[in-house]
Amino acid sequence: MGLHRFLRAATIALILVITAAAAVPNSMRAASQAQSFSAVLVPVAGLVQVLPHGSTEWTNVEEEALIRAGDQIRTDADGMARLNVVTGITVEIYPTSLVELDRLSMQDGPGELFDLKQVVGTIYADVKQVVRPNDRIQLALPTAEITIRGTQFFSFVDPDLNVGIISQEHSVEVQTADRRKFTVTPDNLLFIKFTLPRSDSAIINCTVDFLKASTSPQLVVEPLSAKPTNIQALREFLRALVRSNVNPQIRVFLRRYLGLPDVNLEDLGADDDTTELQEILDAIEALSTEEMTLPEFLSEYREYWGRTYKDALKTTLAPATCGNGRHDLAETLQNCLADFTPITSCGNGLCETNRRGIGESVLSCPADCLPMGPLALSCQTVIEGAVNPPTRPTPVGGPSGIGR
């Protein structure tokens, strides 16, 4: 690490220690006083961008940066980032994801308040701290809210707002807008199917009644054969994975899991590539309870995200000019996929993060990777109001749209 980066990292660490210390109430501080503080965003690979609250300009993150309430974070097709909170919360943000830090503060009296909105994509949350009764650590999804009591879990939101939640350690409590509660453990899977009551993705005014009509939660448990809805929810979850992030690693993972022969994707022409992808989708549709067990799937899913795919995200961090649509002097295909990828397939219904020279993401192809962003934010505000009524303060960020 260069001297400049070392000094910057040390400064950020010192700021966090000071702000966290200031945030802890004591007998000398008025009970009505609450302190907000910052998290640290660490770019891991590729293009990572931040939209500060109140700004209209996304900025590239090339080194550690402070993130405050209301700031949005998004990753490109090859981007990955880690959000660290000094109190012991870590959130890994995978490619083509968009999240917003809604709140980070100490509440009046003892207790930490951490609210994160996950608009789309995949994250891995690791809450190492001991969660006290007065702490509120929550993750708002478009169709549900997760209350965290100290655990590790993956949460997934696809471009169509379908949601998947898989715990890795301990359990998480999930609540929908109509107050239905689900306990997700390391041995089950929650999939929440989202269907628009009418074909109109321009809807942005979400309500509790709208969410009741458009969502179908299914807690998938072993044995899968116990209910037909178990295997159907798993099929829909796998289809959502394919549609949301088409890349070589997910295709290899699914082919092996589904019992399909290995294929060298680099040797395939365009037509053969399409045939191979359709073969995966057909195998998902034909998946039966006799061919699999839930523990096996959950174990392989965690291995894929935590190791296989994560290890593949080693792209050089993007320069400050990346993402502007031009080939600037310091940019190459290796350090700025966003500006070197011809997005000729944008609009085909697949978010193709790494497919035959295509690198779509929430940044470069919202039509495929973030088609219902304003609706997602609107529904998250509704979810928060339903789960935490009505003493909860008005959220920092409103549902006015992505990148406001």
Image (cartoon, rainbow, N blue to C red):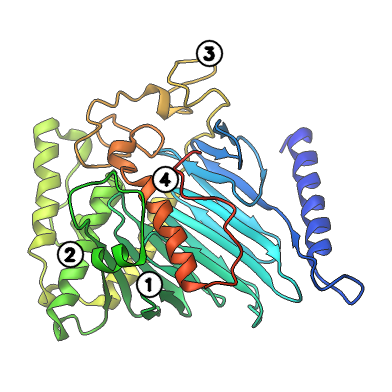
> SS for tag 3?
loop
Observer-nearest of 209 and 296: 209
Measured in 3D between alpha carbons, the distance from the residue under mark 3 to the one under mark 2, in whole angstroms, is 45 Å
**Residue topped by disc 2:** 235
Question: Tag 2, which secondary structure?
Answer: helix
For mark 2, does the 10 Å Cα neighbourhood hold few (<14), some (14 to 19), or many (20 or more) residues? some
* Closer to the camera in the image, 339 or 369: 369
Residue ID for mark 1 = 176
Label tally: 4
Residue pictured at 8% horizontal, 42% vertical:
275
Q: SS for tag 1?
A: loop
Taking 165 as reference, is 182 above or below it?
A: below
Q: What numbered label is drawn on residue 329? A: 3
Q: Amino acid at mark 2?
A: Arg
294 with respect to 180 (left or right):
left
Which mark is first along the chain, 4 or 1?
A: 4
Residue at which label 4 appears = 95
State how far apart marks 3 and 1 are (Cα).
49 Å
Q: Alpha carbon of mark 1 to alpha carbon of mark 4: how far?
A: 26 Å
Spot occupied by residue 348 in the image (x, y as percentages of width and height): 19, 36
Q: What's the amino acid at mark 3? A: Leu
Residue 373 appears in view: yes
Q: Residues within 10 Å of mark 3 (few under 14, many from 20)?
A: few
Name the N-terminal-most of marks 1 and 2.
Answer: 1
Can you say which quadrant of the picture contains the N terminus? top right
Circle 3 or circle 1, nearest the eye: 1
| Distance in Å between CA atoms under marks 4 and 2 | 23 Å
